Image: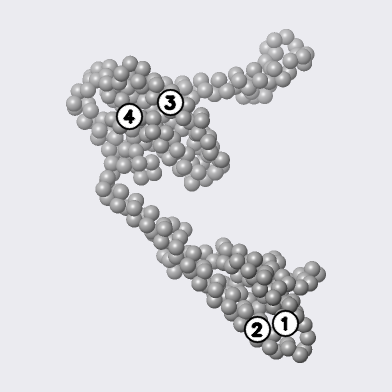
């Protein structure tokens, strides 16, 4: 639950349902305390999760199946919700009353300590989110609509304004580059918004890292970036594109593998329209995307061909990996 969307008190009421005993207590210390009570008073103790899963015990509870509905034991309550159950088997009738009083106090102590720990954790998380949100607000107030909040690159509106200014100054030639993230929709569909947004940030960081300070870089659509290099030196723009591709290939992540398609054109004259040139760059980007797909299929074909050496197939048989069919 992010800052600004849910008030702290509502968050405290709702988030407790996601907590388990180990999120609130040191279960190893509870285990030690249970053993000490078992030794001193002869009482057998069992602490379970809210739905009855056994968490900590001292004594013989192997055959005991907790039924938290019909026999909830002593409930451990935090933020008005049950987070656990305390069960006990006193040793005998001589000290039963005293033991019951100790167990009542123990359950109350668990509830009190759990409440304090829960509020401390949730308030600390909320404070961190608040600080992060305030920092974003300060950044946005300083840069206004100029910056895309997800990536820190230029936003579409300001990028367009900069193009207009470039056209007015009459600077040429310019290298215009279009970068599109491969498989972004796949990541979004299978891993969700958080990971697909992280993929966009990864690529944006690579574009910034490999660029010179004077490069104009904007995020103009969800997974599309435009770059302008004014009066580039010979080979400068292509070297930049190569560095982007290489940085994506060597990037290490447990989930994401960034990959991009890139198109580049040169705007030779001040008379040429920026948007028409970027349209041509997008065309080149799609050609790169399709060429990369063909290269992958060709690599797969060569690999499988090596594996199937010695297998008799009629004529010059090949495999179409898009359809899974053989052809000649």
Q: CA distance from mark 4 to mark 3?
A: 12 Å
Q: CA distance from mark 4 to mark 2?
A: 70 Å
Q: Earlier in the sequence, mark 2 or mark 1?
A: 1
**Where does label 4 land, which residue?**
212
222 is higher (above) or lower (below) than 51: above
Q: Is the Cβ of the residue at disc 4 closer than 8 Å to that at disc 2?
A: no
Outermost right residue:
63
Q: Is the Cβ of the residue at disc 1 closer than 8 Å to that at disc 4?
A: no
Residue at 29% x, 35% y is 159
- Tell me, for residue 102, which label it has, or none: 2
* Count of picture labels: 4
Q: Is the Cβ of the residue at disc 2 closer than 8 Å to that at disc 1?
A: yes
**Where does label 3 land, which residue?**
243
- Tell me, for residue 41, which label it has, or none: 1
Q: CA distance from mark 2 to mark 3?
A: 69 Å
Q: Residues within 10 Å of mark 4 (few under 14, many from 20)?
A: few
Residue 138: where, in percent of width, then height? 30, 52
Q: CA distance from mark 3 to mark 1?
A: 71 Å
């Amino acid at each position: 639950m992010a800052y600004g969307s849910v008030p702290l008190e509502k968050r405290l009421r709702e988030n407790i349902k996601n907590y388990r005993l180990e999120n609130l207590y040191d279960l190893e210390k509870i285990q030690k305390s249970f053993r000490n009570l078992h030794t001193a008073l002869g009482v057998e103790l069992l602490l379970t999760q809210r739905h009855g899963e056994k968490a900590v015990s001292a004594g013989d509870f192997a055959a005991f199946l907790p039924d938290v509905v019909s026999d909830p034991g002593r409930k451990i309550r935090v933020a008005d919700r049950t987070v656990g159950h305390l069960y006990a088997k006193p040793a005998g009738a001589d000290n039963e009353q005293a033991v019951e009083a100790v167990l009542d106090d123990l359950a109350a102590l668990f509830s009190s300590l759990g409440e304090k720990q829960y509020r401390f954790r949730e308030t600390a998380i909320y404070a961190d989110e608040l600080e992060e949100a305030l920092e974003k607000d300060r950044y946005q107030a300083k840069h206004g609509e100029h910056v895309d909040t997800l990536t820190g690159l230029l936003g579409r509106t300001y990028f367009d304004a900069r193009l207009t200014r470039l056209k007015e100054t009459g600077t040429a030639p310019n290298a215009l580059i279009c970068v599109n993230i491969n498989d972004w929709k796949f990541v979004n569909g299978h891993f969700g918004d958080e990971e697909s947004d992280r993929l966009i940030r990864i690529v944006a960081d690579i574009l910034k890292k490999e660029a010179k300070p004077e490069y104009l870089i904007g995020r103009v659509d969800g997974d599309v970036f435009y770059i302008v290099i004014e009066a580039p030196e010979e080979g400068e723009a292509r070297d930049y594109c190569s560095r982007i591709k290489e940085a994506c290939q060597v990037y290490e992540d447990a989930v994401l593998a960034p990959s991009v398609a890139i198109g580049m054109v040169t705007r030779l004259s001040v008379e040429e329209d920026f948007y028409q040139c970027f349209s041509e760059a997008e065309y080149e980007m799609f050609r790169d995307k399709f060429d990369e797909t063909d290269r992958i299929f060709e690599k797969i074909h060569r690999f499988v061909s090596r594996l199937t050496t010695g297998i008799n197939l009629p004529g010059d048989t090949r495999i179409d990996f898009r359809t899974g069919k053989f052809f000649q």
